[in-house]
Amino acid sequence: MSEESEGDAVYNDYLLSQAAELAVEAIEEDLQGKSGSEAADIIDLLSPNSGDEPAAKRWQAHLCHAAQTRKIEIKDAPWFLSDRGWVALSEASLLPLPMDPQVLTAEILRQHAVFPVYAANLAGRSSSIESLSDAHGIDWLPLPEDQAATVESAAACLHSSDSVDWKGFWEDVQDIFADDLSPLQKRRLLLCTDGQLHAGGISGSAIYFKPRQTGPDEDDGPGDLDIDQIPNSLRQMIAILDPAVPVSELRQGRLHNTKLHSELSKADLVGSFRRESVLNQVLIPNLPSLPVRSAGSDADLCRDALFYGIRWCNRCRSGARGKT
């Protein structure tokens, strides 16, 4: 590098440092804590759109130095407008939007977010917020458990409405969680045949796919088995997934499991209805120590468990005789 070029680089770096100091001064003294317009200006100053990665890194370095001279850490400064007011970069998050929202739109997710969401007028600056967050080693999305709680809240609200596109809902959920549904354990999201939302992945209880005979991967029991007629005392332990949740599809005249079926199974949210699972994982662990009094909740539980198990076994035996 020639002396002239080296001198230009030093001078340009000096100008950049002065610009960073002015930017931090403007944010600290004139912009923070004001309106959405000023919030947008702050993002533009901190993370200008640039395809030049080295230049962006130099700008961030100068900003950090300018802030530190004022004893400010950019990631901890309340310079960012959220739905809950002005917060730090380390506290605010972008909405975990699906690529093509069917049900879980920005409006619905924002309404039910359990975390500080960047203000709606900053939506057009998402890429700048992502770049700024990356520069400070901060995830620009909320924690998986916060995303799960947000989706759970949205599901409860949707369920209370007249009708829900559960196919679209679960397409959005799979997109949001990148096909790893394990953060949804213990969240009431799964519509079951009792018309209620249930949570999967809870020890001592289970949600099951409804058995069917059609298809290559049938469950343990005849397809017309009325297993969803569950006695009252067992309804917090056993639930059957409602057909509105799209876990099967018709292809070439036969029912096949969908990708959602696989993802729900893999995340231990829903299981196949098999006698060993029902007895060993749900009924037996929940039975009280014997003997029990002839009246009371323990007696009701023992009676209902016995009734349900016998009815189920009789239906399976009837189905087996029908095949011989």
Image: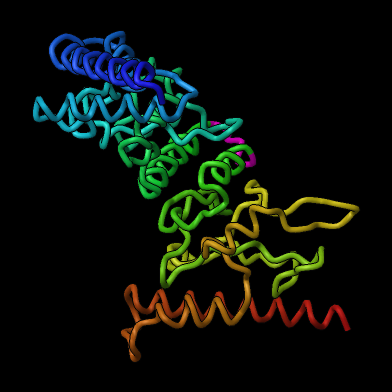
Front one among 189 and 73: 73
The residue depicted at 81 percent of the width and 63 percent of the height is 214
Left or right relative to 275: residue 17: left
User: What residue span does the magenta drawing correspond to?
Assistant: 162-167
Question: Which image quarter holds the C terminus?
Answer: bottom right
Rendered image quadrant of residue 218: bottom right
Task: Pinpoint residue 229: horizontal percent, then vertical percent.
Answer: 58, 63
Task: Pinpoint residue 11: horizontal percent, then vertical percent.
Answer: 28, 15
Taking 49 as reference, is 184 above or below it?
A: below
The residue depicted at 43 percent of the width and 25 percent of the height is 126
The verdict on residue 180 being magenta is no
> According to the image, what is the colour scheme of the structure?
rainbow
Taking 65 as reference, is 305 above or below it?
A: below
The residue depicted at 41 percent of the width and 75 percent of the height is 301
- The single residue placed furthest to the bottom in the displayed view is 291
- Taking the image as drawn, is residue 147 in sight? yes
Taking 190 as reference, is 15 above or below it?
A: above
Left or right relative to 223: residue 206: left
- Specify the principal SS of the magenta part: loop
